[in-house]
Image (cartoon, rainbow, N blue to C red):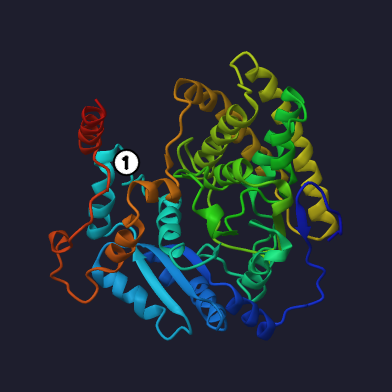
Amino acid sequence: MDFQQSLITTVHDYSLGNLDAIDFNKELRQRPTALLIPCLMEEFKRPALSLIRDTLSTLTGLSSLVIALSADSIDDVNAAEAFFANMPFQVQVHWTNGPAVQDVLSSMASLGLDLTGPPGKGWAVWQGLGVACQQAEVIGLFDADIRTFGSGYPERMLRPLLNPSHGMAYVKAFYSRLSLETQALQGRATRLFVGPLLASLEQIFGALPYLRYIQTFRYPLAGEFAFTRDLAMNLRIPSDWGLEMGLLSEVYRHVAPSRITQVDLGLFDHKHKSLGNKPDEGLQRMASEIFCTVLRSLMEHEGCVMSMDQLPTLEVLYRRVGEDRVRQFGLDSAINRLPYDRHGEELALHRFADLLRPSLSGLLASPIAHQLPSWSRLNSCNPSFAMDLATAGRVGRQSPSYTPSAIRLRRPNHSPARHEDQAKAATTAAA
């Protein structure tokens, strides 16, 4: 714990227990606020989601809860809806991969927009934002597998945005990742990959403004964040494992650092991802996609390109910085009497290092990432699209015989041929 500030505002946890549920609910009523939880059906079998539900049930001032759910059947969706019954606010279980939703998303293909995937957290978050932004002025996002979820999480995350006088537009969480079972340090992708990578890139490219910005975040891979509606509507959402880093890049484009804050949530534990046996599995796949996202952001914001000639320098620097971090985390664990597998950490570091060369080669061959378009762009194409999507996400719960053709979809209000005819008519009239 400290009290230091830097480029972006840091809200510390001083462990004084300054939480007030009554005042927080009053603040929530002053500004329409929604929470978004992307979720798989398997999460309903784990205790974490029950804990989250029970904790959120005390938020009587919350406007709505959107569950962006990936499910196999209407029965699953109905079960999810029953799970969240009797909450003191509106709950919308949005079936992200349902047939009606797929139909609505496919309707935009005529405009050259591919909105049908790839399925994953980014895709679910993007859909959920489209639903939540219709009513809320503030939207907060939490994962469905947080095993330490407490009342302080939503209160500390949302309060910086509820009072407009604070001037904040984006809130990012940070925390101490410790296993509840072993008390060992978790968060290897952040500790052993992102941290050493950013420090190494700074040695190669110098203290660029974007690198300084991204290094200011204590936990850049935290999946918990909140934003105002006007910001959420203008963000392009990455659809791969680079979601969190990609969103930070998008926020950098749209918001001054003075309007960004990071909030300490204290102790935090959720489902842990394995390292994976192959480069396209587990944390290895995540690290590869994060690496490409970081380099792509440097291209976009700083005009800097990592070349294959520079790669050996990066490989050497990354291993050196990473080994220093392993030693530092070892001492931190020892003094706090936490178990620490230094050999396992070193092996993970070397696995991450082996990903740099093939990842850079792939990035240079195909530098453009797949990003889902911002909702402000989609609204310019079809102002009713978000409402159609929200309606489609609810369709079929009471009627198992539902078929996609039963929905009347509004088509995009864009017709190039019609506009060409109007332009010709105007020219003829002028002549």
Query: Which residue lies most toward the top here?
Result: 309
Residue 205 placed where, x, y %? 72, 24
Is 144 left or right of 328, judged from the image as shown?
left
Residue at x-position 55% and y-position 84%: 60
Towards the viewer: 218 or 130: 130
Is 65 left or right of 198, judged from the image as shown?
left
Quadrant showing the C terminus: top left
Mark 1 crowd level (few <14, some 14–19, many ≥20, 10 Å Cα) = some
- The image shows residue 209, relative to residue 94, as above or below, that is above
Residue 310 placed where, x, y %? 65, 17
Residue at x-position 53% and y-position 82%: 57
The amino acid sitting under disc 1 is: Asp
Residue at x-position 54% and y-position 77%: 62
Towards the viewer: 368 or 110: 110
- The image shows residue 223, relative to residue 46, as above or below, that is above
- The image shows residue 279, relative to residue 183, as above or below, that is above
Residue 318 placed where, x, y %? 70, 30
Whether residue 350 appears in this view of the structure is yes
Residue at x-position 56% and y-position 53%: 231
Instruction: Find numbered disc 1 in the image and state the secondary structure of the residue it sits on.
Output: loop
Quadrant showing the N terminus: bottom right
Is 17 left or right of 273, judged from the image as shown?
right
Q: Find disc 1 in the rendering and name its residue.
A: 114
Towards the viewer: 50 or 292: 292
Towards the viewer: 10 or 197: 10
Is 165 left or right of 305, judged from the image as shown?
right
Residue 92 placed where, x, y %? 39, 72
Whether residue 322 appears in this view of the structure is no
